[in-house]
Image (spheres, rainbow, N blue to C red):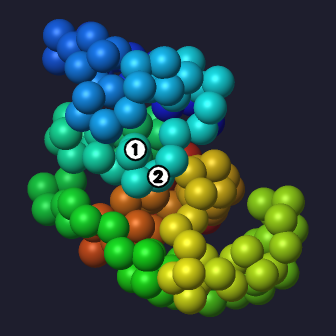
Amino acid sequence: MNYGLKLKKLRIDNNLTQEDVAQVLNIARITYNHYETQEKIIPLERLIVLCNYYKVSLDYIFNLNNLQYSKINKNLAQKSVGNRLKEFRKENKITQVKLAEMLNTNHSVIANYECGRYLISTSFLYAICKKYSISADYLLGRINEPIYLKDNEKH
């Protein structure tokens, strides 16, 4: 997962300091620095705030594609995200157990994401998108049409 360089590029392109971006996120500058250097994984909620602030897609930040979507839902609803993840998993005939194994976790974590108890982690979302070549923005309900990434031959 290499979003740090994109975050830095966006910050510099917008003539912002790390302090400026930290203020947007309401966090300390050193915390933002850890996100930009990827010493810590940025929580998905904060990453979405930055996507909205910079007016870019999560797929762009994740280096999944360079598309800019004309219509993006800027809000995240855990329940809706969970439903989208469950829908995607079932359409692709992936069990919770199989998905959990791929993510090196247990199926109760997947179940908690799917029922909306917790928002999926940034690293798990990225891993799913890379493995199954699906848009992160789609899985989060930020766009409505499923977008399969170009590097996947089977779609």
Position of residue 53 in the picture relative to residue 7 (left or right): left
Q: Nearer the viewer, residue 123 or 129?
A: 123
Amino acid marked by disc 2: Leu
Do labels 1 and 2 touch, CB within 8 Å?
yes
Position of residue 5 in the picture relative to residue 146 (left or right): right
Q: Position of residue 34 (x, y in %)?
A: 55, 23
- Between the residue at mark 1 and the residue at mark 2, the CA separation in whole angstroms equals 5 Å
Position of residue 34 in the picture relative to residue 98 (left or right): left
Label 1 sits on a secondary structure element that is helix
Q: Nearer the viewer, residue 10 or 87?
A: 10
Residue 96 versus residue 130 in the image, above or below: below
Residue 38 versus residue 101 in the image, above or below: above
Q: Which residue is the site of mark 2?
A: 44
Residue 90 versus residue 13 in the image, above or below: below
- Most extreme residue toward the left, as rendered? 70
Instruction: Name the disc covering residue 47, or none.
Output: 1
Q: Nearer the viewer, residue 5 or 118?
A: 118
**Quadrant in the rendering for residue 140:** bottom left
Q: Residue at x 24, y 20 (%)?
A: 20
Label 2 sits on a secondary structure element that is helix
